[in-house]
Amino acid sequence: MVEMSAGIRKTSVAFVVAVVMTALSVSSVAASPTTAGFAVGTVEESVSEVKGSWTQGEMAEAAANGSPSPTPRAFSSIGPTLLSETASTGDFTPEDPTARPYRVHGKVFFRSRGDSFSCSGTFVDSLGHNVVATAGHCVYDRAARRFVEDLTFVPAWRGNATSSEERSPFGQWPARKLVATQDYRFSGQLGADIAFFTVSGEPTRQIGSRKIAFGLEEIGRPVTILGYPAKPEPLFDGKEMKGCSSTVVGKDNGGGVIFPAALRAVPCSMGAGSSGGGWVTAGGFLTSVVSYGYCPGVVSLCDSTFGPVLGSIAKSLYTSEGIGGSRRPSVTKASGPERIGDARSVSFEVDGSGSTPVSNWCRIDGRRARKCSGKVTYRGLEPGRHVFFVQSIDQTGRRSVELRRAFTVTAAR
C-alpha cells in the first residue's frame, strides 16, 4: 500500500526499509514498446528459474517487508465523504483461506534493486485462465524505471504453516506477461495504480477466479477487501490473509492531482502488504484493488483505504494483447414454450454469464434486438412458426453464440 503523508511531492519511489539480500537469482523482464496508455513486460527466465529463486525464508522476509511505498504529494484533507462513516472495525480473518472463494486471493512476491517485497493479488476470470490483478506499484519500480523481478503469485498463501506444501497449497505461479498503465509508470498517478500479469498454465480452471466489473456506480457499494497486510504492526505481520467488510463512502482526488479520483472504503485498517488486494462486491465481482492510504500521517484516516476506479484505463489493460481479456460469455438461460395457443403472446426467461457483467439482447424473427433481462414478453404474434433469439455481451464487447428457440403459435379456433 502506498502511504500518503504530509509534505512535498517526491518524484522517485521510496521503498520500505528491508534487509539487502545477497547472491539473489534475479529474473529479467524485457519491456515491449508502449501502446495505448500501457506498457508491457515479458519475463525472459523460465518458470523453474523463477520458482527456484525463492526460498521459504526469503518469502517470509518479503512478507514482513510489505509492499514498496512511494510517497507522492500528500494532503492533510481529502475530498468530501459522500456517505456517513462508521467507526466500527471492518477487519476479519478468513477461517479457511484455502476454501472458495478466498483461495483465489493470494500473495504477490517480487524483487527490485536487491530487496524482496510482497503485495497482494487476485486471480481474475480471463480467456487464458491465467490472469492476476494487482496494483501498478507492485509490478513496476518507478525509481529503477523498469518492471520488478522474480514476480510470482501464491494463491491462499499461509505463512504460518509448518511445511512448504501447506504454505503454498495451490502452488507458486511465476509471472509471464506484465502490464501497467503509462500514467502510473511515468508520473506515479494513483488513480491509475492498476496492473495485471499472466502466469504459466491455466490455474484458474482448478483454483477458481473472481469475475471483474468495469464502470460500476461505486458510492454506497459494500465491498469485501482481501489481502496480506504487514502493517500496521503488531496488528498484522504479512503472514495471514486478512479481510475488511467495508463500504465505498466517497472519492479522493488528492487536491486535484489524483486522476481519476480514487475510491475511499471505510472501515479498513490494512496497510503495507495489502497493496493490490482485491475489492469484491455483490456477485463476486472484483471492482478495485488496494492502492494507498494516509495512515499514520493523518490519524483520522487510519480507518480508510483507497483504490483506483476500474474504468476505461483498467479495461484497456485487461483486454490488451499481453493479458488477453475475457473468455467468451454464454447464455445460461433461455426458457420458454415450444407451442402456445390463441393468446398470441409468448414469454421467455433469459440470463447470461461472462468474465464481466453481461447484457442480454433478445429478438423475435427479423425484429430489431433489444436489451432484455429476466422475463421478456412478445405480444401480437401471428399464427405460425417463430424463432426467439438471445445473445449475451460482456463489458469488453465479447459476444456469446446467439441462442435460438423455435416455437409455434397455433391458429385461433
Image (spheres, helix red, strand yellow):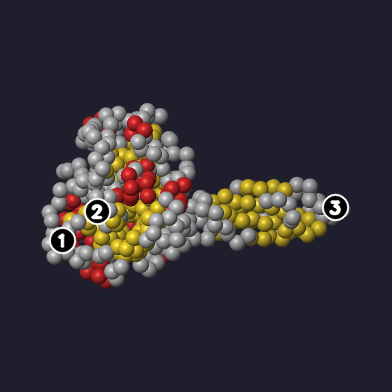
- According to the picture, the residue beneath numbered tag 3 turns out to be 412
Kindly identify the residue that appears in the image at 87 percent across and 53 percent down.
413
Disc 3 and disc 1 in contact, CB within 8 angstroms: no
Of circles 2 and 1, which is in front? 2
Q: Position of residue 148 (x, y in %)?
A: 27, 57
Task: Please name whichever residue, 332 or 82, is drawn nearer the observer in this view of the structure.
Answer: 82
Q: CA distance from mark 2 to mark 3?
A: 78 Å
Kindly identify the residue that appears in the image at 18 percent across and 47 percent down.
16
Residue 341 numbered tag: none
| On screen, residue 63 above or below 72 | below
User: Around disc 2, counting alpha carbons within 10 Å, would you say few (fewer than 14), some (14 to 19), or many (20 or more)?
Assistant: few
Q: Position of residue 292 (x, y in %)?
A: 29, 42
Q: Position of residue 312 (x, y in %)?
A: 46, 47
Kindly identify the residue that appears in the image at 17 percent across and 60 percent down.
58
Residue found at the far front of this picture: 33
Task: Please name whichever residue, 285 or 49, is drawn nearer the observer in this view of the structure.
Answer: 49
Is residue 278 visible from the viewing direction of this image? no
Amino acid found under the numbered disc labelled 3: Ala
Q: CA distance from mark 2 to mark 1?
A: 25 Å
Task: Please name whichever residue, 137 or 99, is drawn nearer the observer in this view of the structure.
Answer: 137
The image quadrant where one finds the N terminus is top left
**Looking at the image, is mark 2 or mark 3 earlier in the sequence?**
2
- According to the picture, the residue beneath numbered tag 2 turns out to be 144
Disc 2 and disc 3 in contact, CB within 8 angstroms: no
Q: CA distance from mark 3 to mark 1?
A: 80 Å
Q: Secondary structure at mark 2?
A: loop
Amino acid found under the numbered disc labelled 2: Ala
Of circles 3 and 1, which is in front? 1
328 lies left or right of 184: right
Amino acid found under the numbered disc labelled 1: Gly
Q: Secondary structure at mark 3?
A: loop
